[in-house]
Amino acid sequence: MTHTLPIRVYYEDTDLAGIVYYANYLKFIERGRSEWVREMGIDQNALKAAGYVFAVRRVEADYLRPAKFDDLLTVETVMGPIKGAQFVMDQRVLRGDAVLFTASVTVVVINDAGRAARLPADIRRKLHDA
């Protein structure tokens, strides 16, 4: 299943050239992941109260085309491989049909001690069902 999130480019997202500053794509895809996780019924506050949090371990990104002020973009998120303590989400940022940015994001579950922890069974089920 592909999750989509519309995002409007605001003036604050751009650099002096009027294009989206490269680091803001990471913010856009973070919002996409966060909204998808919320829509799956995963309560990150409850997860934290149970002693676990999600943390980005790795991002592999390609900047393909620039986005500009006032563009309407779509962030697409697709679940990739799921392993013991980590999962991968593949993401794209599009303007219409044009792909502007792609990323493969590895997310790990860490415990209160800051160490990797296996995905809780209920979370694993929800991610597999996505």
Image (cartoon, rainbow, N blue to C red):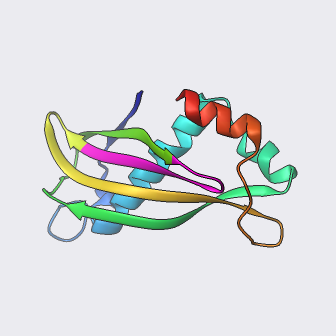
Q: Quadrant of residue 22?
A: bottom left
Q: Is residue 79 left or right of residue 123?
A: left
- Give coordinates of residue 97: x percent, y percent: 14, 34
Does 90 appear in magenta? yes
Q: How many marks?
A: 0
Question: In the current view of this chain or complex, which residue is farthest to the right?
Answer: 50
Tell me the chief SS of the magenta region.
Answer: strand
Q: 33 above or below 3? A: below
User: At x 31% / y 41%, what residue is drawn?
Assistant: 8
User: At x 74% / y 71%, what residue is drawn?
Assistant: 115
Question: In the current view of this chain or complex, which residue is farthest to the front?
Answer: 84
Residue placed most toward the observer, 32 or 119: 119
Residue placed most toward the observer, 81 or 18: 81
User: At x 29% / y 46%, what residue is drawn?
Assistant: 92
Q: Quadrant of residue 18?
A: bottom left
Q: Is residue 59 left or right of residue 9?
A: right
In the rendered view of the protein, which quadrant contains the N terminus?
A: top left
Q: 30 above or below 114? A: above
Q: Which residues are magenta?
A: 82-93
- Give coordinates of residue 118: x percent, y percent: 73, 54
- Give coordinates of residue 130: x percent, y percent: 52, 29
User: At x 22% / y 42%, what residue is drawn?
Assistant: 94
